Image (cartoon, rainbow, N blue to C red):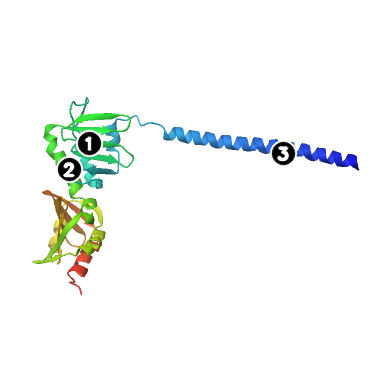
C-alpha cells in the first residue's frame, strides 16, 4: 500500500509539473501575441504624415479661431471652405525676420496656424512652415477670418459676454432680462450656412420677422429672423445667412412678444 501511495504521489507530481509548463507556454504565446499586436498598433499610430503642413491644414474639418478679443470660435463648415479657397494662391517662403500674429487658429488634433495678413505660419511642436499672402488677397482673407468669427453662431450665442439685448418687431422694442439670456442663446441652433436668396424670399413671405440686437464685451451683433427657418447675422459690416431650427423664431413670437397667446 505504501508503494502504491508513493507511485500515485509521483504521478500527480509529474502531471502537475507537466500541466504547469503547458499553461506557462500557452500563456506566454498568448501574451506575446497581444504584445505584438499592440506594438503594431503603436507603429501605425506613430506613422508621421509626410504631407506639407498646408496640405494637412486644408484637410482639417474642425478649425477654431482667435483674434486677441475673442477666442476658440469654431468655423462653420461652409465658411471653412472659403478659408481653404483663400489659401490657394499663397506661396511658401523662408522664416521672416519679424512676425507678429493678429489671428490664430488650431485644429482639433493640434495643428496650429497664425497670420499677420502678410504671412501665414503653420506649425506643430516639431516643425513650421511660412507662406506669403498675395497683396490682392489680404482684404479678402481678413474678411473671411472676421466673418468666420463674428458672424458665427458659436460666437454670437456666447451669452455670458452679453451686456444688453433688445428684440424689435413691428416698431416695438423689448429689452430682454438678463436671466433670460440663457434661454435665448439655447434657441440659437443653426443647421448650415446658406446663400442670401432663399432667406430674403422667406423674409418677404413671413408675417413676423424679428431683429435681435446684442451689445456685448467689445462687439455688437444683429440677428434677424427671416421667416421661421432662416436668420441673418450681421457684425463688423459683414453678414452670414443660416438655415436654423424653428425654436428661435417660436420662442420670440410666443414667449417674448406673446403673439399667438
Figure check: 209 above or below 142 = below
Q: Residue 154's mark? A: none
Residue that mark 3 sits on: 19
Q: Position of residue 232 (x, y in %)?
A: 16, 55
Under circle 1, the secondary element is strand
Under circle 2, the secondary element is helix
Quarter of the figure with the C terminus:
bottom left
Residue that mark 1 sits on: 114
Figure check: 101 above or below 237 = above
Asked whether the beta carbons under mark 3 and mark 2 sit within 8 Å of each other, the answer is: no
Relative to 117, 77 lies left or right: right
Mark whose residue sits in front, 1 or 2: 1
Residue that mark 2 sits on: 144
Mark whose residue sits in front, 3 or 2: 3
- Between the C-alphas of marks 1 and 2, the distance is 14 Å
- Categorize mark 1 by other alpha carbons within 10 Å: few (<14), some (14-19), many (20+): many
Q: Earlier in the sequence, mark 3 or mark 1?
A: 3
Residue drawn at 57 percent across, 34 percent down: 32
Amino acid at each position: 500500500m505504501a508503494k502504491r501511495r508513493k507511485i500515485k504521489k509521483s504521478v500527480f507530481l509529474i502531471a502537475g509539473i507537466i500541466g504547469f509548463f503547458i499553461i506557462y507556454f500557452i500563456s506566454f504565446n498568448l501574451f506575446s501575441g497581444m504584445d505584438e499586436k499592440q506594438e503594431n498598433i503603436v507603429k501605425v499610430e506613430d506613422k508621421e504624415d509626410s504631407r506639407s503642413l498646408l496640405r494637412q491644414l486644408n484637410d482639417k474639418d474642425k478649425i477654431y479661431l482667435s483674434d486677441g478679443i475673442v477666442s476658440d470660435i469654431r468655423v462653420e463648415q461652409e465658411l471653412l471652405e472659403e478659408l481653404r479657397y483663400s489659401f490657394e494662391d499663397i506661396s511658401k517662403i523662408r522664416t521672416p525676420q519679424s512676425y507678429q500674429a493678429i489671428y490664430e487658429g488650431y485644429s482639433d488634433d493640434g495643428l496650429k496656424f497664425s497670420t499677420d495678413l502678410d504671412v501665414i505660419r503653420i506649425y506643430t511642436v516639431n516643425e513650421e512652415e511660412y507662406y506669403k499672402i498675395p497683396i490682392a488677397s489680404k482684404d479678402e482673407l481678413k474678411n473671411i477670418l472676421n466673418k468666420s468669427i463674428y458672424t458665427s453662431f458659436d460666437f454670437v450665442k456666447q451669452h455670458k459676454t452679453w451686456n444688453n439685448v433688445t428684440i424689435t418687431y413691428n416698431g416695438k422694442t423689448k429689452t430682454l432680462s438678463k436671466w433670460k439670456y440663457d434661454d435665448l442663446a439655447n434657441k440659437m441652433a443653426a443647421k448650415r450656412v446658406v446663400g442670401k436668396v432663399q432667406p430674403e424670399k422667406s423674409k418677404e413671405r413671413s408675417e413676423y420677422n424679428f431683429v435681435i440686437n446684442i451689445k456685448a464685451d467689445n462687439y455688437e451683433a444683429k440677428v434677424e429672423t427671416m421667416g421661421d427657418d432662416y436668420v441673418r447675422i450681421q457684425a463688423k459690416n459683414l453678414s452670414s445667412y443660416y438655415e436654423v431650427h424653428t425654436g428661435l423664431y417660436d420662442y420670440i413670437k410666443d414667449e417674448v412678444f406673446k403673439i399667438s397667446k
